């Protein structure tokens, strides 16, 4: 019984870890795996953390957790903006316009700030900003997390 309990608790810890990491899209891989090491979570890889299904063990743990969430948390999750469609050219152009409108001519904005305004994933925001930079509509300064963007003065 002790071994089974330990296994279920370990699975729950891994599932919780993966869910929290997925909510923090601005964390680097180094941050994620350093945290996993500190928490004693072994054997995770990029596929597991970012792209894989949550572990199937845990006997309905995710469903029980969803039932236990307060009603306010369920409502806020339902009110989140829909993920933008960037799979089509038309969808990318529409999203690029939204990202462009979120930028200022005077103030510099970091990608996470833009993402808060327009929604989407970190990859969608970065790709949109890259397209806008290539078109000459947006300029940037800095590197890595310190990169900032603004509308180009024309």
Image (cartoon, rainbow, N blue to C red):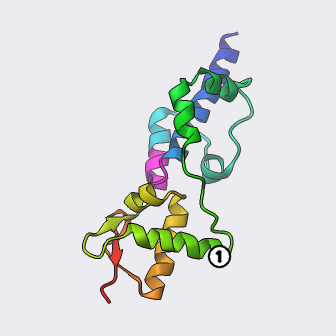
Quadrant location of the C terminus in the rendered image: bottom left
What residue occupies the far left of the structure in this picture? 106
Element assignment for label 1: helix
Residue 12 vs 111, above or below: the answer is above
Q: Position of residue 93 (x, y in %)?
A: 57, 76
- Name the residue nearer the viewer: 3 or 50: 50
Q: How many marks?
A: 1
Whether the magenta-drawn stretch holds residue 33 is answered as yes
For the point 60% across and 73% down, which residue is it? Answer: 92
Task: List the residue tagged with mark 1.
Answer: 90
Query: Which portion, as a residue range, is magenta?
Result: 24-34
Q: Crowdedness of circle 1 by 10 Å Cα count: few (<14), some, many (20+)?
A: few
Direction from residue 53 to residue 107 in the image, left or right: left
Direction from residue 48 to residue 19 in the image, left or right: left
Q: Position of residue 149 (x, y in %)?
A: 35, 72
For the point 45% across and 41% down, which residue is it? Answer: 35
What residue occupies the far top of the structure in this picture? 1
Quadrant location of the N terminus in the rendered image: top right
Q: Examine the rendering and report whether any part of residue 127 can be seen.
A: no
Direction from residue 151 to residue 10 in the image, left or right: right
Residue 45 vs 128, above or below: the answer is above
Q: Position of residue 49 (x, y in %)?
A: 60, 47
User: Quadrant of the rendered structure where residue 140 is?
Assistant: bottom left
For the point 63% across and 19% down, which residue is it? Answer: 6
Q: Position of residue 15 (x, y in %)?
A: 61, 34
Q: Examine the rendering and report whether any part of residue 110 can be seen.
A: yes
Residue 15 vs 96, above or below: the answer is above
For the point 59% across and 34% down, which residue is it? Answer: 14
């Amino acid at each position: 019984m002790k071994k089974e309990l330990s296994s279920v608790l370990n699975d729950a810890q891994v599932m919780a870890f993966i869910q929290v990491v997925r909510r923090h899209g601005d964390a680097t891989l180094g941050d994620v795996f350093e945290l996993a090491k500190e928490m004693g979570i072994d054997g995770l890889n990029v596929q597991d953390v970012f792209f894989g299904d949550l572990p199937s063990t845990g006997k309905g743990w995710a469903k029980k957790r969803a039932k236990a969430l307060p009603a306010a948390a369920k409502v806020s999750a339902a009110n989140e903006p829909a993920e933008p469609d960037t799979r089509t050219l038309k969808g990318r152009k529409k999203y690029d316009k939204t990202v462009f409108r979120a930028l200022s001519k005077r103030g510099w904005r970091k990608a996470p700030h833009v993402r808060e305004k327009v929604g989407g994933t970190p990859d969608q925001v970065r790709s949109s900003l890259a397209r806008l930079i290539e078109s000459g509509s947006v300029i940037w300064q800095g590197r890595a997390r310190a990169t900032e963007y603004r509308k180009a003065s024309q």
